[in-house]
Image (cartoon, rainbow, N blue to C red):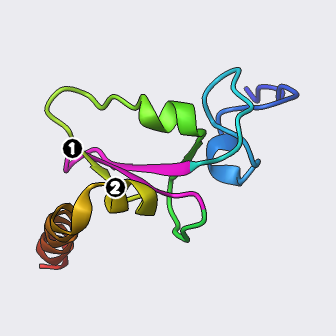
Amino acid sequence: MVRPQRPGRGYGDGVSGSGSCARPACNGPIAAWLTYDYAGQQVWLDDADSTGGGNRWALCARHAERLAAPRGWTVLDRRTAHLLGGGAEVVAVRREAELARLSALAG
């Protein structure tokens, strides 16, 4: 059975580039992109102007700052403003962790 499409915002709007936050009833402008890896139990926040593919969800500034991942998951906030606020050492540690993760995935 095929269900009729509902008008207005829907589940796919988070990845379709609608220009606003993917959270229900929120029309805030995109401030960050949320991506995740279920198997690796990791969540990433990236700058709104970053490029990327796959399933990523638009979040406004309010929802990006309030993001809570499931217990046991790692949250990596890779937004430029957030990294700069953490100092050069924090930036280096986060970049090293991300490079190590990507290297492990590559084999």
Q: Secondary structure at mark 2?
A: helix
The residue shown at (88%, 28%) is: 7
Q: Quadrant of the N terminus?
A: top right
* Pick the front one: 65 or 103: 65
Q: Nearer the viewer, residue 32 or 8?
A: 32
Depth check, mark 1 against mark 2: the one in front is: 2
Give the residue at mark 1: 41
Task: Tell me which label, 1 or 2, sits earlier in the chain.
Answer: 1
**Is residue 47 on the magenta stretch?**
yes
Q: State whether residue 25 is above or below residue 41.
A: above
- Counting from the top left corner in percent of width and height, residue 81 is at 44, 58
Q: Is 54 on the left-hand or right-hand side of 83?
A: right
**Type of amino acid at the residue the image marks with label 1:** Gln
Amino acid of disc 2:
Gly
Count of numbered circles on the image: 2
Magenta span includes 13: no
